[in-house]
Image (cartoon, grey):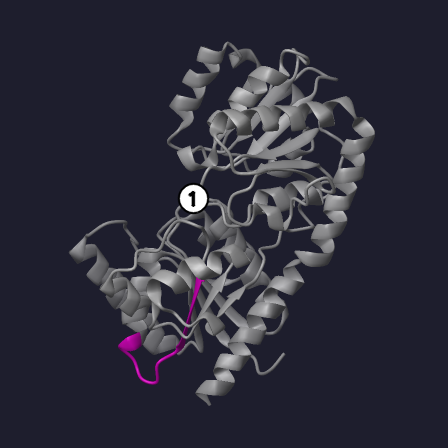
Amino acid sequence: MGRPLKIFHINMHRHWGGQPNRVLTESLGLRELGHEVWVSGPRGCLLVQRAQAAGLATFDDLDLLRGLHPVSQYRDYRALADLFARERFDIIHTHGSQDSWLSLFAARSITPQPILVRTRHNTFPVAGHALNKWQWRQFDWVITISPQVNDLVSGPTGFPRDRITAIYSAPDPDRFFPREPDPKIRAELGIPEGVPVIGKVARLAPEKGHHLFLRAAAFVLKEFPEARFVCVGKGRSRGDIEALARELGIERNVVLTGFREDVPDIVALFDIFVLSPTSGESLGTSILEGFCMEKPAIATEVGGTGESVRDGKTGYLIKPAPEEIQIKKLAEAMLKLLRDPALRKQMGQAGRAMVLEEFSPRRLAGRCDEIYQRLAAERR
């Protein structure tokens, strides 16, 4: 590590998910390395609440609204510009669209200008229009969370490929670790003792592929009629998911928990962890959390899910194919693991060992620090 730096992280998300989780993990790791770290987001967001609880400096006097809202966005710009002028951060690190635009203009309004870093968290296409190209090229470095994202940034924007670095996200091993299932949680969710549990932790959104999960579940239930399929998370697709469960006649076997603070205790109930995205998934941090708890994983291969789901070793990776084939392969993988407790244990243990070695919070913070120190040295 080089000299201590003053670092400002900002993310536009109001609710919890992979992006806020990474920002908080990264910020805590950077603090351990001796840096002064601030965390920012929209008013009342969970990221800022959890950062405050962890003792980090925070700033949330912002709207960070999606879309075009000139009055609100000007207020956000002024608030950030005043903060940046007062606090004189070395690094401004952004994580989304709205926060990147506003932070960029606010940073450019002061002298000397801070270093600008941006993380790209997903595999959705980056628009290659002139305004976007200009914006991306204002950043000093871009970090992605898996190598599969690098070309998706550099291709459309022209951002230099040699100034893009993939750094894996990291779960919190102090929160996610192997434990015995809590009978109270099992009873609360209406899951009888001894029945197989296949679970998924993801926002309830179309790109997360809950329809693939439920359609595969319908096949699995033919052999394991008492199995439960647990979906942890909230989102706009809840009504569609409930309707599909009714259409398939499996609603009594499907448990939608909504947003939960006790995710590790729910994952402890799982025999198998499933993530079945159809797009936009750059790594799948929830898979890493499942591995930390020694749960074997099944995932559709989207973006960087194959970085951690090592097919046949830590779980099963479902290759891109027409949906009816993916559904069949998901069901086959679930059945194979349900029939073989020893294989589940072996893959789960392999997954935990892999995460502790390759996806640790210390590694995440250390690699970010390397980039910050390089940029700080260039600036000097």
Q: Is residue 80 visible?
A: no
- Above/below status of 334 relative to 40: above
- Given residues 4 and 351, the one toward you in this image is 351
Whole-percent x and y of residue 71?
16, 57
In the image, which residues are magenta? 108-119
Q: Which residue is drawn at 39% across and 29% down?
A: 237
- Above/below status of 188 relative to 31: above
SS of the residue under disc 1: loop
Where residue 328 sits, quadrant-wise, is top right
- Above/below status of 134 relative to 111: above
Q: Residue at x 47, y 44 (%)?
A: 16
Q: Which residue is drawn at 69% across and 50% down?
A: 173
Counting labels gives: 1
Q: Is 368 included in the stretch rendered in magenta? A: no
Determine the residue located farthest toward the right in the rendered image.
Answer: 342
Whole-percent x and y of residue 43?
35, 51
How dense is the environment of label 1, judged by Cα within 10 Å: few (below 14), some, or many (20 and up)?
A: some
Whole-percent x and y of residue 315?
69, 38
With 90 as the anchor, is 185 left or right in this view?
right
Instruction: Please state which amino acid type lies under the numbered disc 1.
Output: His
Where residue 106 sits, quadrant-wise, is bottom left
Q: Which residue is drawn at 52% across and 22% down?
A: 214
Task: Indicate the quadrant containing the N terminus: top left, top right, bottom left or bottom right.
Answer: bottom right
Determine the residue located farthest toward the bottom in the rendered image.
Answer: 380
Whole-percent x and y of residue 59?
39, 61
Q: Can residue 34 be seen in this view?
A: yes
- Above/below status of 240 relative to 362: above
Mark 1 highlights which residue? 15
